[in-house]
Image: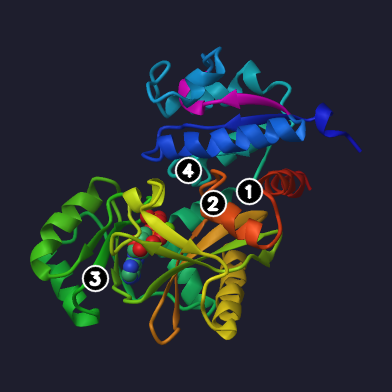
Amino acid sequence: MTSKKDLTVALLLGGTSPERDVSKSSASSIYKALTALGYKTILIDPAYGKHQPHKEEDFFAQKDFTEITNRNYVEAVDSKLFDDVDIAFLALHGKWGEDGTIQSLLELRGIKYTGSNIVSSAMSMDKIMSKILFKHYDINTPEWIGVNQHEKEIDVKKMIKDKFGFPCVIKPNDQGSTVGLTICKHEDELHKALKLARQYSNKILIEEYIPGREVTVGVLDNKALPVLEIKPKHGIYDYECKYTSGMSEYEVPANIPEWVQLELQSQSLKAFEALGCSVYGRLDFRLSNDFKTYCLEVNTLPGMTSTSLVPKMAKAAGISFEELIDKIIKLSLQ
Ligand SMILES: Nc1ncnc2c1ncn2[C@@H]1O[C@H](COP(=O)(O)OP(=O)(O)O)[C@@H](O)[C@H]1O
Ligand SMILES: [Mg+2]
């Protein structure tokens, strides 16, 4: 067996999605762990093409080192940067990084990468497609309507009223980090909410609003981790609550009856499998006050700072952050 010292890991970070900064935070923690574990690690920001920063700190800096474009991804993966790489550790989030795009480029170049494959990544990023599969496999999910660009607001309003009414949740079909999402309390707010979501996606997902609690389940190596409850300071787990320390409280294992925990874990494994995901991921749920579970989405490249949710759940299962990173690499190499 090859030892860690013989393995070169390319840690992919940054990217061009609205989650570029979140990705840098994930990468910074992963980089420390990889180094401590003894992996030979190189940093690559695909948004920079073949002209990468020479200094480590420039990868993590707020200011861009050079122009960033999606086209650069092709140039980066096709360049010498990847010549000696054994596996790419994907610390990217959102579009182009989490949706199967970078996975496709890496596969064409014959480079292994961490996490789910192309199709599973693409399907998980597409919230409507995921929900169609959830329904098919008896995984409970909020009722929904899919809306395209051409649909008139007046028709959308009627569809909402006919199906579940207000409040409802308006989200772009393929974004993360609660970007472009509105809890639409009243029909008067619909115009603004649709306009915002349309800035991010041609396809909009409108869901019935599920009052209750916010829970999430990590999956690692086909096993569900302990359930975590999020208690955001805002009513909704938005960008600020997700990434500002002190803006949310977390409880893991969640203070819920054991049968609910088991149900959430079993629904998570079913959803993970329905989408064909592998290695690791995180499933977001709403939990109603009468303990009905509603699966919202699968995150195939969840946040990975040492205080992110998957590392918290792993810790509750006795798996340290370094062990988690090591496991992800080993499982992805198989
Ligand atoms: N149907 C819903 N009912 C109640 N709250 C919701 C619903 N959908 C989303 N939310 C809130 O918005 C957050 C983000 O939604 P989610 O579907 O997980 O998208 P993202 O990819 O942005 O994380 C959730 O964590 C939850 O706080
Ligand atoms: Mg989510």
Marks 1,4: beta carbons within 8 A: no
Q: What element carries label 4?
A: loop
Lower position in the chain sequence, tag 1 or tag 4: 4
Q: Which residue appears at 55% of the width and 45% of the height?
A: 304
Lower position in the chain sequence, tag 4 or tag 3: 4
Lower position in the chain sequence, tag 2 or tag 3: 2
Q: Is residue 136 left or right of residue 78?
A: left
The CA distance from mark 1 to mark 4 is: 12 Å
Q: Is residue 262 shown in magenta?
A: no
Classify the position of ligand 1 by quadrant: top left, top right, bottom left or bottom right.
bottom left
The residue that label 2 is drawn on is 121
Front residue of 114/72: it is: 114
Q: Mark 2: which amino acid? A: Ser
Q: Nearer the viewer, mark 4 or mark 2?
A: 4
Task: Give how far across and how far down residue 219 sits, in percent.
Answer: 62, 61
The residue that label 4 is drawn on is 93
Q: Nearer the viewer, mark 1 or mark 2?
A: 1
Q: Mark 4: which amino acid? A: His
Q: Magenta part of the protein: which range?
A: 40-49
Marks 1,2: beta carbons within 8 A: yes
Marks 4,2: beta carbons within 8 A: no
